[in-house]
Image (tube, grey):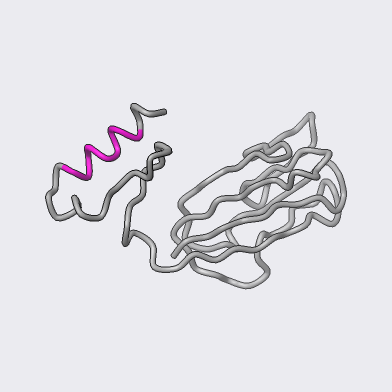
C-alpha cells in the first residue's frame, strides 16, 4: 500500500505545477489539494431485501463516491447497476460486509443501485464534486 501511495505522489511530482498541491500528514495518507471542490454525504436503506434500490431518487452529479456498509448491518450489501443482487446464489455487483467501503468514479449518484440480504439495512456514502 505504501508503494502505491509513493507511486501516486511520484506521478504528480513529475509535473512541477502539482508539487505544492500534494502532501502527507504523517500517518501515510496522501492528500491532493484542489482535486474536488465539494464533499457531501448521505445514507440510504434498502427497505426490501432482494430488490434493487437506487442510491439517490434525484439526480446528483458527482465525480467520485465512497459507499460504506453500516457497521450495524447483519447481512450483505451489494452495490452495482440496475441488475445488482445480494442474493447468495446470484450475487451481482460489489459485495460489502458491515464496515466495508467501495470507491468508484461516477458521474451521478442515481447510477448506483443497492441490494441487501436483510431488510432495512443500508449504507452511508460520501461523494465528491
Quarter in which the C terminus is drawn: bottom left
Q: Give the answer, above or below, for where 127 lies relative to 84.
A: below
Q: Give the answer, above or below, for where 118 lies relative to 110.
A: above
Main secondary structure of the magenta stretch: helix
Residue 4 appears left or right of 67: left
Q: Which region shows up in magenta? A: 5-13
Give the quadrant of residue 4: top left
Q: Number of callouts in the render?
A: 0
Give the quadrant of residue 11: top left
Find residue 53 and report its horizontal and vertical position in percent.
Answer: 74, 57
- At 55% across and 66% down in the image, what residue appears? 40
Residue 11 appears left or right of 54: left
Find residue 101 and report its horizontal and vertical position in percent.
Answer: 60, 42
- At 55% across and 70% down in the image, what residue appears? 60
Q: Residue furthest left?
A: 16
Residue 87 appears left or right of 62: right
Give the quadrant of residue 24: top left
Quarter in which the N terminus is drawn: top left
Amino acid at each position: 500500500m505504501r508503494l502505491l501511495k509513493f507511486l501516486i505522489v511520484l506521478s504528480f511530482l513529475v509535473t512541477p505545477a502539482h508539487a505544492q498541491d500534494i502532501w502527507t500528514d504523517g500517518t501515510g495518507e496522501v492528500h491532493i489539494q484542489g482535486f474536488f471542490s465539494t464533499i457531501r454525504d448521505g445514507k440510504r436503506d434498502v427497505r426490501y431485501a432482494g430488490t434493487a434500490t437506487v442510491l439517490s431518487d434525484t439526480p446528483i452529479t458527482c465525480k467520485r463516491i465512497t459507499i460504506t456498509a453500516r457497521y450495524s448491518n447483519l447481512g450483505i450489501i451489494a452495490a452495482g447497476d440496475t441488475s445488482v443482487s445480494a442474493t447468495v446464489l446470484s450475487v451481482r455487483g460489489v459485495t460489502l460486509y458491515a464496515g466495508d467501503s467501495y470507491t468508484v468514479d461516477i458521474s451521478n449518484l442515481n447510477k448506483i443501485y443497492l441490494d441487501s440480504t436483510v431488510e432495512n439495512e443500508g449504507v452511508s456514502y460520501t461523494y465528491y464534486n
